[in-house]
């Protein structure tokens, strides 16, 4: 379960049969589920930076999609927060372009989309948002994303065999660490949501 | 457009329209849209050479969110419309999108015969085991014991198994994807579009509003332990005995697609009309 997505209703908990079935399936698949692919060291600095750029672009796109969704669902405070994050991530992507002297998007390498998890570490999964979420939740998601990115670069630095790649990975890890600190500081200035933040007096569901 | 200008490289953004999806935040269909646009960038066919056809339902809104030609049609009839389109315009890449209710219930008969005809098009079903747009009624793929206000105690009716039905009916490509893995889903969609004949992709796409427990799918989805087979009997056995969360291409056949050109080669519509003149 995501750190944010706490639905007002929890039908699974009310339905023992469904819950048991899910548990059975989970137990069955746990043994079969292959381990996540390990982080593989890029062979060149260009390859590494192209992957870092892709990571920032995907994160920006996802935040932008979240902002659109929140605007559509009349949650302007969170929409604005996600829009700000999208701008930050786009800026980071532009910085990579400038550092590498690229005038246009780098070509996708064989490493493109080759992440340790389903998506790039800095991309927040689509299902971790809720239409009633509050700005604090958006920051909570950003914090988790920055922490994942920091861990990713730390791991890349650990497995890197090329000195330039290791140095760049450590540099980006330090940047992500700084972002983590920034988001933590930001969270202190934003009101923490009440326990019943997800309770909708007029819920969209007939199924409760 | 200036003929001398080199064509701009196609990116996923090239296939996204200015219309913003109105799906619930957290809906799996966002990821499917993302996967579709990534796949289209990957196959590098320009939007004006692609038609996205749909029926009715949350997921059937997808054509409006792309820059391709779109046809948002009648409930359950997307495959019929798309078949006509592909036969009349074989030059177009035709992609059909929709949900489990639209495709397996209202359009169930069209599904069988689209598989059987094997026209060269791609059918993407975003399956969330519920009718989301109409507020949570059980669909053909809903579990028989899914207890809800609209189906107290569950329907007690066996779930439809779309993958094995597609296989038995003659689909030439059968795959299962997961919305939580948009990059993996994009690869599967690209493979499906490139594969000749009728390609069917069942995408597990959680409905976080009416089936919040489907967030757990993320814990269950896993790559299929073996690659695609071209043996339908073997594919059927695997599909019937898997845990419902095997992700990947499960069957890739070599059956010849339905001829996109009907009638004699070079026959014009005017000549055909002349045959029916009174």
Image (tube, coloured by chain):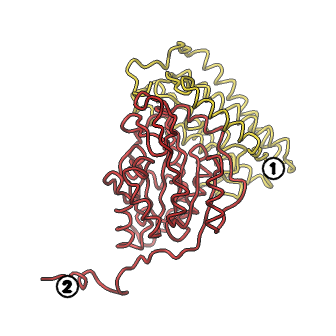
Chain colours: A yellow, B red
Q: Is residue A7 above or below residue B75?
A: above
Question: Which quadrant of the rendered structure holds the N terminus of chain A?
Answer: top right
Total number of numbered labels? 2
Q: Chain of mark 1?
A: A
* Mark-to-mark CA distance, 1 and 2: 67 Å
**Rendering coords of residue B40 (x, y %):** 51, 59
Q: Residue A80 appears at what percent x and percent y?
A: 47, 29
Q: Is residue B218 visible?
A: yes
Marks 1 and 2: which is nearer the front? 2
Q: Position of residue B97 (x, y in %)?
A: 44, 54
Q: Residue at x 66, y 29 (%)?
A: A144
**As drawn, is B12 to the left or to the right of B249?**
left
Report the residue at 42% width, 32% height from top: B151
Label 1 crowd bin: few (<14), some (14–19), many (20+), radius 10 Å: some
Q: Nearer the viewer, residue B66 or B205?
A: B205
> Between residues A189 and B36, which one lies in front from this camera angle?
B36
Specify whether A30 is left or right of B116.
right
Which residue of the protein is positioned furthest toward the front in this rendering? B156
**Residue A94 can be seen in this image:** no
Q: Secondary structure at mark 1?
A: loop
**Position of the C terminus of chain A by quadrant:** top left
Dot label at residue A173 = none
Instruction: Read off the residue under disc 1.
Output: A41
**Pointers 1 and 2 within a single chain:** no
Q: Is residue B38 above or below residue B214?
A: below
Instruction: Check residue B274 in the rendering and tell me which mark sits there, or answer none.
Output: 2
- Asked if the residue at tag 2 contacts the one at tag 1, i.e. Cβ–Cβ closer than 8 Å, the answer is no
Chain of the residue that carries numbered disc 2 in the rendered image: B
């Amino acid at each position: 379960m995501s750190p944010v997505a706490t639905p007002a209703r929890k039908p699974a908990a009310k339905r023992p049969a469904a819950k048991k079935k899910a548990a059975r399936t989970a137990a069955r698949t746990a043994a079969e589920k292959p381990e996540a692919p390990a982080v593989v060291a890029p062979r060149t600095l260009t390859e590494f930076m192209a992957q870092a750029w892709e990571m920032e672009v995907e994160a920006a796109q996802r935040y932008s999609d979240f902002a659109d969704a929140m605007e559509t669902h009349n949650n302007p405070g969170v929409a604005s927060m996600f829009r700000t994050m999208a701008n930050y991530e786009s800026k980071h992507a532009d910085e990579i372009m400038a550092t590498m002297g690229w005038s246009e998007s780098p070509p996708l390498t064989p490493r493109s989309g080759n992440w340790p998890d389903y998506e790039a570490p800095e991309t927040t999964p689509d299902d971790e948002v809720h239409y009633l979420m509050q700005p604090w939740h958006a920051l909570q998601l950003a914090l988790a994303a920055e922490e994942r990115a920091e861990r990713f670069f730390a791991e890349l630095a650990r497995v890197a065999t090329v000195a330039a790649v290791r140095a760049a990975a450590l540099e980006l890890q330090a940047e992500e660490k700084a972002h983590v600190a920034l988001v933590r500081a930001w969270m202190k200035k934003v009101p923490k949501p009440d326990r019943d933040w997800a309770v909708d007096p007029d819920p969209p569901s007939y199924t409760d | 457009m200036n003929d001398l200008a080199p064509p701009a490289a196609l990116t996923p953004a090239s296939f996204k329209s200015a219309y913003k999806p109105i799906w619930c935040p957290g809906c799996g269909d966002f990821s499917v849209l993302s996967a579709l646009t990534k796949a289209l960038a990957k196959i590098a066919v320009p939007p004006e050479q692609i038609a996205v056809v749909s029926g009715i339902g949350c997921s059937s809104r997808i054509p409006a969110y792309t820059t391709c030609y779109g046809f948002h049609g009648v409930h359950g009839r997307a495959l019929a419309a798309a078949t006509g389109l592909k036969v009349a315009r074989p030059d177009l890449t035709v992609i059909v999108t929709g949900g489990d209710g639209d495709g397996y219930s209202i359009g169930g008969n069209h599904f069988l015969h689209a598989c059987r005809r094997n026209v060269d098009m791609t059918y993407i079903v975003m399956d969330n085991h519920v009718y989301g747009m109409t507020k949570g009624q059980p669909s053909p793929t809903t579990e028989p014991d899914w207890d809800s206000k609209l189906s107290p105690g569950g329907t007690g009716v066996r779930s439809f198994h779309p993958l094995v039905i597609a296989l038995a009916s003659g689909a030439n490509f059968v795959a299962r994807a997961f919305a939580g893995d948009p990059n993996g889903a994009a690869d599967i969609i690209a493979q499906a579009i490139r594969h000749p004949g009728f390609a069917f992709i069942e995408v597990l796409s959680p409905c976080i509003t009416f089936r919040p427990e489907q967030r757990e799918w993320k814990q269950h989805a896993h790559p299929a332990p073996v690659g695609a087979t071209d043996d339908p009997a073997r594919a059927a056995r695997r599909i019937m005995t898997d845990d419902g969360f095997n992700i990947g291409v499960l069957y890739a056949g070599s059956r010849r697609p339905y001829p996109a050109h009907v009638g004699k080669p070079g026959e014009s519509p005017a000549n055909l009309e002349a045959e029916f003149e009174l």
